[in-house]
Image (cartoon, coloured by chain):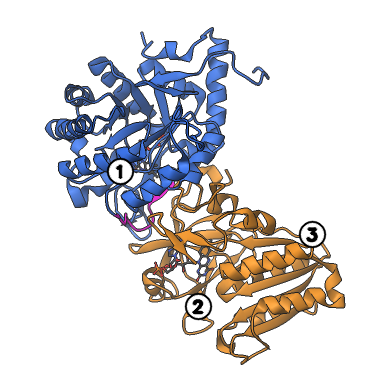
Chain colours: A blue, B orange
Amino acid sequence: MSDKLWAMANLKVNFCGVEFENPTVLASGVLGVTSASLKRVVEMGAGGVTTKSIWMEEHKGHKNPTMFGTEHFFLNAVGLSDAGIEKARGLFAEYGEPAGSGAKNVRPAPVIASIVAGKQSEFADLTEEIVKSRPDILEVNISCPNVEDEFGIPFACDLLLAADVTKVVRRKLDELGSKIPMIVKLSPNVPNIGRIAKACADEGADGFCAINTVGPGMVIDLKTRKPILANRVGGVSGPAIKPIAVKAVNDIHKATGLPIIGTGGVMTGEDAIEMMMAGATLVGMGTMVYYREVGGFGEVVKEMGDWCDANGVEVVGDLIGSIK
Amino acid sequence: MDVKNFNTIPETIPIKKIVKETDTIWTFQFEYNLESKPGQFLMLWIPGVDEKPFSIAYDDGKEFWLTIAKVGSATEELFKLKEGDLIGIRGPFGTHYKWEKGKHLVLLAGGYGAAPLYGLARAAVEDGCKVDFVVGARSEDLLLYEERVSALGSNVTYHAATDDGSKGHEGYNTEILEEIIASKDGEGVSKIYACGPEMMMKRAAEIARDKGIKSELALERYMKCGFGVCGQCCVDETGVCVCKEGTVFDGERALGFSEFGKYHRDSMGKKVEW
Ligand SMILES: Cc1cc2nc3c(=O)[nH]c(=O)nc-3n(C[C@H](O)[C@H](O)[C@H](O)COP(=O)(O)OP(=O)(O)OC[C@H]3O[C@@H](n4cnc5c(N)ncnc54)[C@H](O)[C@@H]3O)c2cc1C
Ligand SMILES: Cc1cc2nc3c(=O)[nH]c(=O)nc-3n(C[C@H](O)[C@H](O)[C@H](O)COP(=O)(O)O)c2cc1C
């Protein structure tokens, strides 16, 4: 262990033309309800943040219990609760204007707007609204497993639907003349994630975020014989899913070569390095907050720097896709 | 993280006893070693229904109590349960009240806030503290915990304030707080603890600040996870999670939250004025 304060390695990365101070980003759905909360995550060391998935209209979500964890995994079925586009507008206004905009309240780090909808046409409408708030990146969430009762299987689990949503959002962005990079958030719950990524890439995705939660899974209380989540089933995240995420990221990397936010089970700097080797440019963390609290972001960044320094890596970006 | 082995799967245990405080406020008692500290809360799962946060009113290492008001759909279902029925618990979560041995403390309770402050009073008296326990309610029949608090002994004084004057002082409990501080005896007050409606807590914190006395408040915000992950209870503009870095905050710190006494958020994150 070294006791130096700063890593010597350069931890900056460029993702679809957007500069990040370091490769860590907050994953969607964790600490992403308010601007103040996102800013705090940046203060704690994250290179960027993702909002909780935004709907056009209010969306209640599921009753509690919506989440809990063990040493190995975390299970959640929040059901994408959100107060809709109007609240989101307020959030972006509070978070600040894009870097280089010359505005007084410049945002502390890039923000990725995660959007969700039940129909293709709604994705188009929401895209039109959300770009007005000038997020740095648009993340199209087509992979949440927790609203299946409402909407059927996620778009991300069907190659044609995934491609179609991508096309609809791409067309809208082009129509608006928007240069905001658009990435698609994919589900690991498919036989071949690389093929789905390729189909989205062909329809104009600029990159990907992978993975959303695994499963769904279920936990049953033995005494009452009832599933604990109010939604009965929920998405699995946390340490247990890391190997699935690393493999998925590598598959997408090989299939498309596009930039990826590698997400899923990243808890430490070494986990993050592994994700980059698999093909990730940025590394998303959500459930890490459960195990290491919000301060974990800065710790992971430091661990990444330490690893680079100890292994003669001068530029962290050199690790991207360096798997042999 | 203070959650043992990271296991936050609710554990189901039987309700041992139900004590009716009023028609709509009941105390649920459980035989279980929760290992909580005064001011902490837990998430209570009504299997198949919902799961909600409640403050721990009493915990002696063998049993613990929750004092719960029937206010909506989840608590209505809870009030249908009987002794022996199974219920799930997750926790304890959050920060706790802090006090020093042998000091003079004033506890200010509104509504079911009397329950967690009873837990504090009990522990503080054991540590040789002198306690003024000031409760406010709309009317006499809604005053909670009087007998239990009075039974803590001669070091505890129970003061009541009611809106309609049916018992004790007619008016706000914060007026009693001001009287106590202004009295000769009040010079030695080392800390003020408040739990109840946010406006009451804000007033208490302001009184404390003006008199140069420390204070601690237990904030309430909409909670889902209880352990600092979902972000539902983050307060403006610091972004601090109430469930994790609170719910008990120093009064000074709480007064610094820009939303304190102004608004909170609903289950979707939308602002709601108090
Ligand atoms: C830390 C903390 C400690 C609490 N301690 C107690 C206690 O000791 N005794 C007690 O009677 N009540 C306590 N409450 C409030 C209690 O959680 C709510 O009364 C309960 O959740 C109501 O649920 P419901 O479905 O019956 O009512 P609903 O109709 O759903 O809601 C009624 C009101 O309760 C509040 N509420 C609902 N759900 C939540 C939630 N998940 N988190 C926070 N507030 C909510 C809202 O302000 C709402 O307006 C506490 C709340 C918090 C945050
Ligand atoms: C409580 C919780 C809420 C989540 N909500 C969302 C969401 O709203 N939108 C989304 O795209 N992903 C959501 N996710 C998935 C995460 O963004 C992430 O893809 C997944 O949890 C795997 O990463 P992790 O192991 O680092 O958490 C959520 C995850 C958790 C644990």
Whether marks 1 and 3 lie on the same chain: no
Q: Which residue is mark 2?
A: B26
**Circle 2 chain:** B
Could you tell me residue B227's position as x and y percent? 51, 49
Residue type, label 3:
Glu
| Figure quadrant of residue A204 | top left
x 32%, y 51%: residue: A84
The residue positioned farthest toward the left in the image shown: A160
Question: Dot 2 surroundings within 10 Å: few (below 14), some, or many (20 or more)?
Answer: some
Element at badge 2? strand
Asked whether A50 or B48 is in front, the reply is: A50
Could you tell me residue A26's position as x and y percent? 44, 35
Q: Is residue B121 visible?
A: yes
Asked whether A102 or A30 is in front, the reply is: A102
| Figure quadrant of residue B187 | bottom right
- State which region is magenta: A58-68
The answer to whether the residue labelled 2 contacts the one labelled 1, judged by CB atoms less than 8 Å apart, is no
Q: Is mark 2 within 8 Å of ligand 1?
A: no
How far is the residue under mark 1 from the one under mark 3?
47 Å
Left or right side of B123 for B254: left
**Circle 3 chain:** B
Q: Quadrant of the N terminus of chain B?
A: top right
Q: Which residue is mark 1?
A: A217
Element at badge 1? strand
Could you tell me residue A88's position as x and y percent? 37, 47
Q: Which mark is residue A3?
A: none
How far is the residue under mark 3 from the one under mark 2?
31 Å
Q: Is mark 3 within 8 Å of ligand 1?
A: no
Left or right side of A304 for B114: right
Question: Dot 3 surroundings within 10 Å: few (below 14), some, or many (20 or more)?
Answer: few
